[in-house]
Every structure is written in C-alpha cells, then in structure tokens.
C-alpha cells in the first residue's frame, strides 16, 4: 500500500499531522508493507526567494490578524506540537519561499533520503533559531545531514530549473485530487485524508484502504511468461 | 499513476516484455505521470549462489526437454527479442541464482538507479558472453555503471541479509496478487497484466487505468490544515 502526503515545510499543521500519521502507522499491523511518499505543496508559491519576513508580521499583513491573534495562533500551534512531542518556537520564526526545499526533497527522494530530509527541514524551520529561508549554506548543511552528497545539493540549488517541474507537477496533482490545503494524505489513490487529523482517523483510513484493496482486473489474455514450469509459450 | 513490474533477471519473457511495455509507455500521452517500480520475483528461489549451469542443460534436466527442444526454445526467444530490437545469445548462456541481483536492485531503487541497473543486468545476462552468476566482481562493475557507489554495492554483496527481506516481501506480494509467473505488471494496484503481452495490451491497460482512476473517498471530517486562507482551526 502506498500513502502519498502533500505538505509544505512552512505548514505547521503538516509538521503536527506527520507526527499523528506516524503514530497511527507505527501501530498499524501491516506497516512494513506501507510505502510513504512526500509530495510538494507550496502554500505561498508566488513568494520570491529573497522575500523573508517574521511569521507574526506575515500573519498580520497577509491575513489581517491583529498581532495578538497571530501570537495566540502560534501559541496554539506550539501547544498542539508539544502534544505530539515536537519542539516549536512560537516566537521569532521566519516565513519565506519553500520552493528550493521542495526541489531538494525531490533530489532526496531520488536518493532514498526524502524522509530524513523532510524531518530535518521541519525541525530546522519550526524549532531552531537559524532561519532556513534564503540561506543556501543552511540547506546544504541540512541535506548533507540527511545523507545527500554536498556537490549534488549545490548543483540543484544553483540551477533553479532542477526538479522545478516535479514540484509543479505535485502541486497540480494535488489540485486534481481535490486538495486545497495541506497536509493532504492519499492512500492507494483511493482514500483521502485532509488535515492534521487525530491518529485514530489515520488508523481508520489505513485499515479501510488495506481491507478494501480491490482484486486486480486482468487486461489481456494468456501470454508469454516464465513460471514454475519454465518459459514455454502458452498453447492456444 | 504507478506501474509495478515483477520480474526476474533470468526470465527471457521479462526482458522482452519490458521492451514491449516501454514501447506502449513511450506513446502514452500521460507518460510523465507514470512511475515505474520494479519488484523482485525469483523463478528459481532454491538455487544456491554457486550452482551455475548452462541454460540448455538446465532446461533438459529441470523440464525434461530434449536438447533439440531446448535449443528451439532459445531460438524462438532470440527471434522474439530481435523483434523488439534486443540482443540475445541463444547459445552458451548460463543459469544461476538471481537473489544477489534482486538485492542490488533494491539498493538501486533506494538510490534512484533501479531502471539503469535492471537494464544493465538484462543486457549482461542475455547478450554478453561473461556470465553474471556467482561473480561479485561482475555485479560490482554493472552496479557502478548504473551509477551506484562501489563500496555500498560491495557491502550489500558481502552481507547476505542486506535487502533480503525486501526481496522476499516482493515475492510474497506477487503471490498475494495472484501472480504465478513473470513478467507481471500491476497498474495502480487495480489492473494486472500477465506476461510479455503485445504493446497494444499495455496501451489498453494504461488507458483504462488512467481513465478509471476513482475519485478519492474522504476519511475524517474537517481538520487542522493550512490553505490559501492561512492555518486557522476550522470552526465547528
């Protein structure tokens, strides 16, 4: 079974939702047969790489919140994160473009290091003081810590077209699947779970998707194949 | 859309079937959105690593063919391969255990090099004089040519448990999906295509699987998510 998770590094509910999903997955009896793939979703796709601002100012300007409302929102997120055992800095975080991080996550997927890199990016963005935005050196550091080759990472960062199509294709696919926000979880392209649901909801989705895997529909008749009796051509 | 292909390196119809599938895929309008994953299937799982024998003798001993029948079978396979533009040595090939090759294909998948390695293994087994069986040096050479790191490859070869569970899990899953022979193609876990079918059958399967992708069934209600309007908690 395959679970695809659309998310953004700058999305606090994605950070929290990932932990809740993982709690459900860890207890799922068929977890060894579940493959998880992370897909790109930019919440703020128009933002330029150099356009970095404090989260609180972004919230007041973009959504017209008062500073108090913005801070209360961050406090709530911090408490929800803490409930999942996740560190969260409620003050002093930055907001910026996550496009380069998504490109690196595609490189990491190709190298079998996607999960590692995503966890480090979340941790760096939500819990560490140094900003992850507009700082290639920081991204190289994190990608190397995730097991990627530094030169390969620098090459991707230096070429803004590298993995750019893959990021946009993921984004387009999310829209086709009906997702307007993230996190968005898709199980075997059959079940969708939207948001940082409680672990119980993920357990239900995993259980249903597992139990209702359809029997395969055969296309084509007998054909040339090898099996326990050798590789003979079927006699019609 | 995802296509999983179960196959064995020692399976001539897998070699031929892969080319037929790829012909259909190359002409499929949504090919950019098709992901191909190769899965392990050992046709001769009980064979020890050192137990290598000429294909013709294996065919006469294992399946009770006469030498003439075995040679005619190889000639037919050579002609079918040629029909797909694939080189095939009809005399002098060896048969042996493919377990280590499957383990390396799992390493290659983790490093984004599975397709490259599988093509090189097929080519080496079916078209080149030097045997691929019981020859770690040869496997290291091929894996490095596929873009893998030589030390990582040697480490996997030296440890017979490395990726062994993954090979066995693939094999078990093939049985669960109803495959008794290979190649076996599974599209989005919904459609199954068995054998080296003509390209037209693969085209039909790709088209049907693409067109009949089900709409997602939602599990869980509104939940904490970030979208174009920010990361507010939904008001119930």
Image (cartoon, coloured by chain):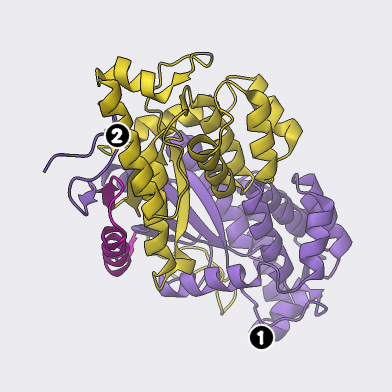
Chain colours: A purple, B yellow
Q: Is residue B33 visible?
A: yes
Specify the subunit that label 2 lies on.
B
Marks 2 and 1, how far apart at CA: 75 Å
At horizontal 45% and vertical 42% (from top left) the residue drawn is B88
| Residue A35 drawn at (x, y percent) | 48, 45
A224 vs A171, nearest the viewer: A224
Which residue is located at x 32 percent, y 62 percent?
B206
Q: Is residue A204 in view?
A: no
Q: Which residue is mark 1?
A: A64
> Which of pointers 2 and 1 indicates the residue nearer the eye?
2
Q: Report whether B70 appears left or right of B160.
A: left
Magenta region: B191-218
Residue B5 shown left or right of residue A154 in the figure: left
Q: Does A181 appear above or below B152?
A: below
Question: Which residue is under mark 2?
Answer: B73
Instruction: Please report the residue visible at 64 percent of the width from the left and 62 percent of the height from the top.
Output: A12
Q: Is residue B10 above or below residue A200?
A: above
Q: Quadrant of the N terminus of chain A?
A: top left
Marks 2 and 1 share the same chain: no
Q: Residues within 10 Å of mark 1 (few under 14, many from 20)?
A: few
Magenta stretch holds residue A96: no
């Amino acid at each position: 079974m395959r679970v695809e998770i659309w998310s953004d590094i700058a999305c606090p509910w994605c950070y929290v939702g990932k932990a809740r999903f993982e709690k459900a997955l860890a207890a799922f009896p068929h977890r060894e047969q579940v493959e998880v793939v992370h897909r790109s979703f930019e919440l703020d796709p128009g933002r330029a790489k150099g356009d970095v601002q404090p989260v609180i100012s972004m919230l007041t300007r973009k959504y017209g919140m008062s500073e108090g409302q913005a801070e209360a929102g961050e406090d709530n997120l911090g408490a929800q994160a803490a409930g999942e055992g996740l560190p969260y800095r409620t003050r002093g975080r930055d907001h910026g473009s996550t496009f380069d991080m998504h490109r690196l996550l595609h490189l990491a997927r190709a190298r079998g290091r996607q999960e590692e890199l995503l966890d480090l990016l979340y941790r760096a963005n939500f819990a560490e003081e140094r900003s992850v935005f507009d700082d290639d050196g920081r991204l190289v550091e994190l990608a190397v810590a995730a097991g990627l080759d530094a030169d390969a990472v620098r090459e991707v960062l230096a070429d803004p077209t590298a993995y750019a199509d893959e990021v946009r294709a993921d984004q387009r696919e999310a829209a086709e699947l009906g997702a307007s926000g993230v996190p968005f979880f898709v199980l075997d392209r059959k079940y969708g779970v939207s948001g940082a649901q409680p672990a119980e909801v993920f357990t239900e989705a995993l259980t249903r998707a597992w139990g209702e895997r359809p029997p395969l529909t055969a296309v084509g008749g007998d054909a040339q194949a090898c099996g326990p009796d050798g590789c003979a051509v079927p006699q019609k």
